[in-house]
Image: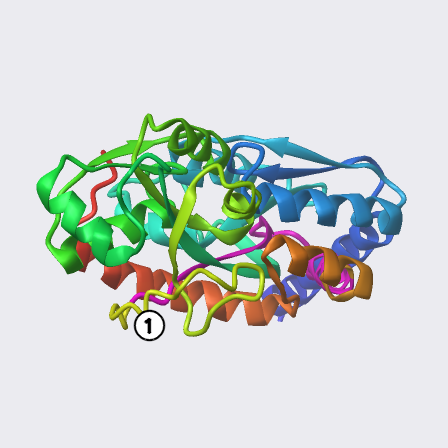
Amino acid sequence: MNRLFMLVATAALMACAEYASAQTFPNRPVRLLVAFAPGGGNDLIARVAAQKLTEILGQPVIVDNRAGGGGNVGAEIVSKAAPDGHTLLNISAAHAIAQTLYPKLNYSLTRDLTPVAILGSSPLVTVVYNGLPVRNVNDLVGWAKQNKMVYASGGIGVISHLAMEIFKVAVGVDGTHVPYRGAGPAATDVVSGQVHVMSNTLPSVLGLVKAGRFRAIGIMTEKRNALLPDVPTFVEQGYRDFVMGNWTGIVAPATTPRAIVNRLASDFTSIVRSPEVAERLTQQGFEPLGGTPEDFGRLIQNEVVRFGKAVKASGAKADG
């Protein structure tokens, strides 16, 4: 009986502590880590959300870019942060990929971090240097079989890396991978011709495609995208299995009080679903989403399994 009493008392104290923590949150600035360099899709949506969350919380929400390790540097930092809601992480499909791609990680996506809310998703677009004699995906395959293809990604293990690894295996070409610290620097070198090709998210390449700085040869969706109506899908070019995109969302340290997680989930969802923000994100190439922590948790679990199979099938390696 004494042990039962102690267990009940401990649970009650923990519940009271969680309630008190939730009641005082936030009592200082909130730090939102983005695990990639400025200028990419994850960074874009995080900054939009942070600006609006600042207005809702009445405390500054500071975006802190911590690029490196395919997103793992930022994830490790947040996994060890105080679980009080004041340190959050913007994650993407790269973090689900990393769980299989990297043989050793200093954090677990499903154990050390707790899902808050998904923000949005975006399809991948394959772009090439304007000086390349390539107008479509078949042209790229033919060119890569005759030349030494050099392809960029936003970092080892991110979806732009995995997409090209899967593509190489599927069409039987080889190439040299050059990882960058984010989509922005990678795109810059495709424009200059330092690298030949890249598959990256629509928001990270849209402006440069429209400006004619490099050429889009295919989008990895079932149907053409209204923002790039002249760019054919991989599917219509005969590559039926190439439907792939990135998602981005918010997580917190694993033991963050449920009341704070739920509040943040509600806030982030209201932000991305608001007419003003939804229109802004749509025009940048995102599909605004939002949802509950449980919704996002199921997506993360499913994506860890799905990308795990893709990593093993492609033979992708974390050492590039």
- The quadrant of the image that shows the C terminus is top left
Q: How many residues crowd around disc 1 within 10 Å: few (fewer than 14), some, or many (20 or more)?
A: some
Q: Position of residue 186 (x, y in %)?
A: 42, 33
Residue at image point 68% right, 35% down = 63
| Residue in the foreground of this view, choosing between 62 and 215 | 215
Does 137 sit left or right of 255 as displayed? left
Q: Is residue 256 magenta?
A: yes
Does 181 sit left or right of 251 as displayed? left
Q: Position of residue 82 (x, y in %)?
A: 64, 39
Res 271 → quadrant: bottom right
Q: How many marks?
A: 1
Does 289 sit left or right of 55 as displayed? left
Element assignment for label 1: loop
| Residue in the foreground of this view, choosing between 310 and 168 | 168
Q: Is residue 259 visible?
A: no
* Magenta residues, start to end: 242-270
- The quadrant of the image that shows the N terminus is bottom right
| Residue in the foreground of this view, choosing between 308 and 219 | 219
Q: In this picture, is 236 found above or below 187? A: below
Q: Position of residue 50 (x, y in %)?
A: 74, 44
Residue at image point 58% right, 43% down = 207
Res 66 → quadrant: top right
Does 295 sit left or right of 181 as displayed? right
Q: In this picture, is 265 found above or below 194? A: below
Say what amino acid the circle numbered 1 marks: Glu
Instruction: Identify the residue under disc 1.
Output: 236
Residue at image point 58% right, 33% down = 38
Residue at image point 51% right, 53% down = 202
Q: Position of residue 59 (x, y in %)?
A: 86, 40
